[in-house]
Image (cartoon, rainbow, N blue to C red):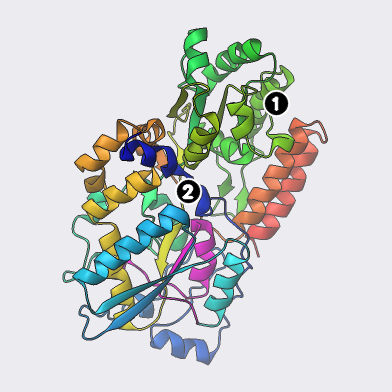
Amino acid sequence: MSKLRRIAALGLTAVLLGGCVPQKVAAPEKAEETKAEETKAEEGQAKNEGTNGTEAATEAETAAAIATEITGPVEITIWHQYSDQYEVWFQKVADEFHAKNPDITVKLQYQPADQYEAKVMAAAKADDLPSMVHSAAANMTSYINEGALVNLDDYIYDSAVGYENFDEDINSGLNQMYVPWGNKRYAMPLFLGGNVFFYNKTMFEELGIEAPKTWSEVEAVATAVSDKIGKPGFGFQILVDGYMEVLTQAGGEVIDLDNKTVGFDSETAREKITWYKDLIDKKVARLVGDDKHFTNPFANGDVGCYVALSGNYGYLATAVGDKFELGAAPLPQEGPKKFVSLSEPVFAIAKTSPEEELASWLFLKYLLSPEVNAECGTVFGALPASTAAMNQSVYQDFLKVNPVAAAVYEQRDCYGYMPTIAGWYELRTSLDKALEEIMLDISDMDTALAEARKSAEAAIRK
């Protein structure tokens, strides 16, 4: 097996290692309206108001001058969750950056997932964050509300150290992440990915069927597969996330940001819940249940196709081995809005000192440079954040040998974010519980959604 193909088989596992599913972060405390706060504001350090991160940063913050030159040795520390070969690559890039910028030393510190977000929040409250942090976009809202993060716009558009043609080069789907943050860029991912449709390509060819392009086509595909294997053949690895994508594509909304109300119990929402419940009742679809993950059932032929994060490819390729050919296709799309929810963790720069913030920005900018970002895409098996990186020959060659990367690339114009608000973890958890109760006939739809609404709206209105 060639080196490129070995990378292709392993690459997409990093999304899971990076903590794609948001972890709960303690709710930030509201800023107190005191003279002490006014003094901080005058110093450009005032915390953002509003517990949902919807308010723009203070004028004092955005007006703060930035450093544009490194005048002496600077060390930056980065908390991250990359391990194994991904951490090796990250260290290699840090060393290369240091060689090109000898006054800047990059110190990488791996952080175990357990209690990671609690550690970051504690550091944010104590004004003791490292130079850069790595977390799910939804979690960043809490750190923004603590006034702990740098507005990257100050650097992106600076004439001396900025990112030329940033708006044209970076995937436009990222803009949805910034809406709850007053349209200010407080964080950036290195690569993009999300749910794709995994399938047993060998079985599909035997049955004469293709991967569905719309959700309406899923029932026929799932029925054919189920008849073949004698059991439900389709599923969502994480039902709540797949449901929110189906709903968003259909023109529905999970949450109304303006009114701080949920929309997951609307007429459209109920239609989509009923759609999947019907597939389960017809025994052509299932929940992941006690299996916890579809990897082994899929590899063993007990499931013929399912929707899961692109980052599962490495695990799947290992589990499937030579049993059959593994296929991957873009997430089905149906409705007025094409949508795939971005899931990767993002990097943010903490407020430290002017030169440390500048050094952090220069390293982030280096990670997004075409050559480095293209290499990043091949290592992580994902879509580079930069269009220029996507067009690099090394990445284009990679697409030819990695079916999941090809699927992620094909749906590149569909990417967006679920609202990055405080309370998102509770909202998502409440909806997940409701969907499971409905699918398993533990509760009727009205009761389950009413309970989910109550819990979710209480969380987002704190």
In the rendered image, residue 139 lying in the magenta stretch gets the answer yes
Who's the residue at 38% across and 63% down the image?
184
Quarter of the figure with the N terminus: top left
Residue 197: x and y in percent read 49, 29
Q: Where on the picture, by quarter, is residue 113?
A: bottom right
- Number of labels in the image equals 2
Q: Secondary structure at mark 2?
A: helix
In the depicted structure, whether residue 272 falls above or below residue 205: below
- Residue sticking out furthest to the left: 160
Which segment did they paint magenta?
128-155
Who's the residue at 36% across and 69% down the image?
151
Residue 408: x and y in percent read 39, 36
In the depicted structure, whether residue 165 falls above or below residue 288: below
Is residue 321 left or right of 459 when viewed as pictured? left
Q: Is residue 391 visible?
A: no
Residue 389: x and y in percent read 24, 47
Name the disc covering residue 15, or none: 2
In the depicted structure, whether residue 382 falls above or below residue 363: above
